């Protein structure tokens, strides 16, 4: 080890390394604090002899001038309040003699001398004296510019040409993440680790880096290529060995069985390795294959296996990790320098890093293929991320059982479903296609998919990530489902709505075609389900009106005269079951605009609703309820009947004056912003009607109260703006903002590509 790239560490990594390093350098235990406002303390030791503070500044791209300015401006005031007996600075910025003198002078007497100021060179020197400490911190070990080459050049430890070929490239692009750290901890504890996850998420990469880690600790590495019996042949007593068994359940199809009795032999080997010091085994598999194997092989459900499983998830790859992965792959790719430099532009890298379907394998494959074909790499990468078929097509179409595929198809119509609803719809679907639909088969399908393609939490089932849902939509659009059977298996109107929404999408032409082909079935389902809809008079989101409005939109999409006739029939009946008047307004506008509804029918419905609103408003006026009455008046203002509006306004003026008199007679209380809208509405209405002079004294009282509440609201808004919109110190920004800034700094390095 001759140097380290400390820029590979996160802020937290750097603090943890400094804690261990300076605990050893100073000979005292240092405590570390969680993220947040630290009052100038990153690491601290307290004792009767005094307090020692170590300030960690991980700013690998900053200049010495910036570091000194920020330390004096931000940290010195905090240190004067804390008044520690000793103050040390550890930073990834290089410090010159003059820089150290300036800091010592500014922080005197807390900094005892320039020896308490550790720049990047001093930290690296201390680390080089402590190789055991370096090995305890994988990110630090990985950041060494020499350690990996040392590991990878030890042919005596690499007993596989495949390992020798793959490890260097993986080491160049690997970025440690939470999933890797879980796997590493599991391997340390049990000596066996089964790494599972969806295709492309980085299972093999994690396995290779765990292998490299063990090689660095003196292990010989062996690849298992056939079955677990190879381990017995390769086993050497007294020698540290790690066995890498990649895709141990196969790569292509669930019909491929383990070799005869291999489940029993595998369990025996796992137990032997766990009981033998200096032995380790790392296995990988797609997690849906593991679930399927567990259903077939009872021995794979035992704690020896299940407790050794670590699943790599897409959520492990948060934004900063994604940015580093993209940078590493672009930097080490065979793309021309001018193409690499394009990725320094945020308009190029940001859509990739933020993409919901981000997948390291897709990034790698796109760069590899584009380098050969001379494509627009950025455009090709976005296209591949937008299209999840590359990842999921082989699995869904070739590797899953039919009951599992049917479950995905049914789940798409729900998006998220309760277990009972999902099972009811799935059973109906299976019966329509004449397949087994018993509870045991349902549970097997659920177990096979759970944790891989779907998630089951608190009795609800949803897709594991958006790219799977996107693929199932493509699967349906391509005509790969039994569409008639699927339609007849729907149990809720929301399922039909989901299919219609998918048909409206730019790439939903296939689904639209099939819905039109089965229009009689769709119409029958919609009418049957609509009859069961609960009446919700004042519900904010759903009502009979919103239902009919959606049915009319579906009728237009499917060219369905049947559904249009259903809507017209329902809009002949009294308006009262339709829901809020605001919903009725949307239904009126839809009837007006629909080519399937005669103009006369839409006009009759509008007039009937207008008359009903007017009648109900007059009831509220007579009851003296000004606030409900004014709400209905606003609805009338959007109708074509001027006479109704004028008649309504006359009654409302008297109603409003009574409310004005009531409010003015009440003693003034502490201003409450919640009442401002009501006060403003009353004042504005009386002003527009010219009625303020009828009760001038009362109007002045209420108007003054409204002004005071308005002033209070503006003061609170300005306070909020001052609090949230001022320019803040980067160290106080959100994790997302900080990660974005760090990714931007990383990607800008590609500008220097030659």
Image (tube, rainbow, N blue to C red):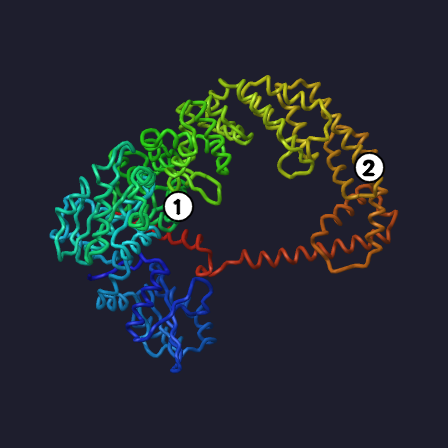
Seen from the viewer's position, the closer of residues 717 and 423 is: 423
Residue annotated with mark 2: 619
How far apart in space, not on screen, are marks 1 and 2 (Cα)?
60 Å
Label 2's element?
helix
Callout 1: few (<14), some (14-19), or many (20+) C-alpha neighbours within 10 Å? some
Say which of 77 and 182 sits in front. 182
Q: Residue 420 at what x, y percent from top left?
A: 50, 36
Taking the spot 49% from the left edge, 17% from the top edge, the residue there is 517
Q: Position of residue 212 (x, y in %)?
A: 21, 52
Other-residue count near label 2 (Cα within 10 Å), few / some / many at <14 / 14–19 / ≥20? some
Q: Which residue is mark 1?
A: 346
Q: Is residue 662 visible?
A: yes
State the SS at label 1.
helix
- Would you place residue 279 above or below residue 537 in this image? below
Q: Is residue 745 left or right of residue 557?
A: left
Where residue 178 appears, as percent x and y from the top left, is 35, 52
Q: Mark 1 vs mark 2: which is more N-terminal?
A: 1
Q: Is residue 481 above or below residue 284?
A: above
């Amino acid at each position: 080890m001759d140097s380290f790239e400390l820029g590979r560490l996160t802020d937290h990594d750097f603090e943890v390394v400094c804690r261990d390093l300076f605990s050893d350098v100073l000979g005292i235990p240092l405590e570390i604090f969680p993220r947040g406002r630290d009052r100038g303390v990153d690491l601290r030791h307290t004792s009767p002899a005094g307090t020692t503070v170590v300030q960690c500044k991980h700013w690998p791209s900053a200049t010495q001038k910036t570091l000194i300015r920020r330390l004096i401006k931000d940290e010195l005031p905090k240190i004067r309040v804390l008044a520690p007996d000793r103050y040390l600075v550890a930073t990834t910025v290089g410090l010159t003699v003059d820089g150290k003198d300036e800091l010592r002078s500014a922080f005197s007497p807390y900094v005892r001398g320039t020896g308490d100021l550790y720049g990047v060179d001093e930290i690296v020197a201390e680390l080089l004296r402590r190789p055991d400490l370096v090995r305890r911190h994988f990110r630090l070990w990985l950041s060494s510019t020499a350690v990996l080459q040392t590991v990878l050049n030890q042919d005596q430890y690499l007993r596989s040409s495949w390992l020798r070929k793959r490890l260097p490239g993986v080491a160049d692009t690997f970025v440690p993440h939470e999933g890797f750290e879980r796997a590493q901890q599991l391997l340390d504890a049990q000596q066996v680790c089964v790494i599972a996850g969806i295709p492309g998420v980085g299972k093999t990469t994690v396995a290779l880096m765990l292998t490299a880690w063990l090689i660095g600790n003196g292990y010989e590495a062996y690849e298992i290529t056939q079955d677990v019996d190879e381990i017995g042949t390769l086993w050497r007593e007294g020698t540290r060995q790690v066995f890498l068994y990649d895709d141990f359940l196969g790569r292509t199809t669930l019909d491929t069985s383990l070799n005869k009795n291999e489940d029993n032999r595998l369990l025996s080997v796992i137990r032997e390795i766990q009981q033998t010091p200096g032995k380790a085994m790392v296995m990988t598999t797609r997690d849906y294959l593991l679930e399927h194997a567990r259903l077939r092989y009872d021995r794979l459900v035992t704690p020896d296996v299940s407790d050794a499983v670590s699943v790599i998830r897409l959520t492990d790859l948060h934004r900063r990790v994604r940015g580093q992965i993209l940078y590493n792959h672009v930097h080490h790719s065979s793309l021309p320098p001018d193409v690499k430099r394009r990725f320094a532009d945020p308009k190029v890298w940001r859509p990739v890093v933020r993409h919901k379907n981000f997948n390291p394998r897709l990034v790698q494959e796109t760069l590899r293929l584009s380098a050969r074909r001379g494509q627009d790499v950025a455009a090709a990468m976005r296209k591949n991320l937008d299209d999840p078929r590359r990842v999921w097509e082989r699995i869904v179409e070739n590797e899953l059982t039919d009951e599992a595929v049917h479950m995905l198809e049914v789940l798409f119509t729900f998006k998220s479903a309760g277990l009972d609803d999902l099972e009811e719809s799935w059973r109906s679907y299976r019966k329509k296609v004449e397949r087994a639909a018993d509870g045991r088969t349902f549970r097997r399908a659920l177990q096979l998919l759970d944790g891989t393609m779907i998630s089951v939490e608190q009795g609800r089932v949803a897709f594991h990530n958006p790219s799977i849902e996107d693929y199932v939509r493509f699967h349906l659009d391509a005509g790969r489902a039994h569409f008639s059977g699927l339609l007849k298996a729907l149990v809720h109107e929301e399922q039909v709505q989901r299919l219609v929404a998918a048909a409206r999408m730019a790439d939903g032409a296939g689904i639209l075609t099939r819905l039109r082909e089965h229009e009689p079935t769709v119409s029958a389902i919609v009418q049957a389900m609509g009859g069961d809809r609960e009446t919700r008079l004042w519900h904010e989101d759903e009502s009979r009106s919103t239902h009919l409005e959606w049915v009319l939109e579906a009728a237009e999409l499917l060219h369905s005269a049947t559904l249009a006739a259903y809507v017209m029939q329902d809009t002949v009946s009294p308006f009262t079951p339709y829901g809020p008047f605001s919903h009725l307004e949307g239904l009126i506008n839809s009837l007006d605009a629909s080519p399937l509804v005669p103009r006369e029918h839409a006009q009759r419905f509008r007039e009937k609703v207008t008359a009903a609103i007017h009648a109900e408003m007059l009831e509220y006026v007579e009851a003296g309820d000004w606030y409900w009455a004014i709400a209905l008046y606003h609805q009338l203002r959007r109708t074509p009947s001027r006479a109704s509006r004028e008649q309504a306004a006359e009654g409302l003026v008297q109603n409003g004056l009574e409310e004005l008199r009531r409010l003015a007679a009440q003693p003034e209380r502490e201003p409450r912003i919640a009442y401002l809208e009501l006060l403003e509405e009353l004042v504005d209405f009386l002003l527009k009607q010219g009625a303020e002079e009828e009760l001038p004294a009362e109007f002045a009282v209420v108007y003054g109260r409204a002004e005071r509440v308005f002033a209070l609201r503006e003061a609170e808004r300005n306070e909020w703006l001052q609090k949230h919109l001022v320019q803040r110190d980067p160290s106080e920004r959100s994790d997302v903002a900080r990660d974005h800034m760090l990714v931007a700094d990383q990607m800008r390095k590609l500008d220097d590509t030659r």
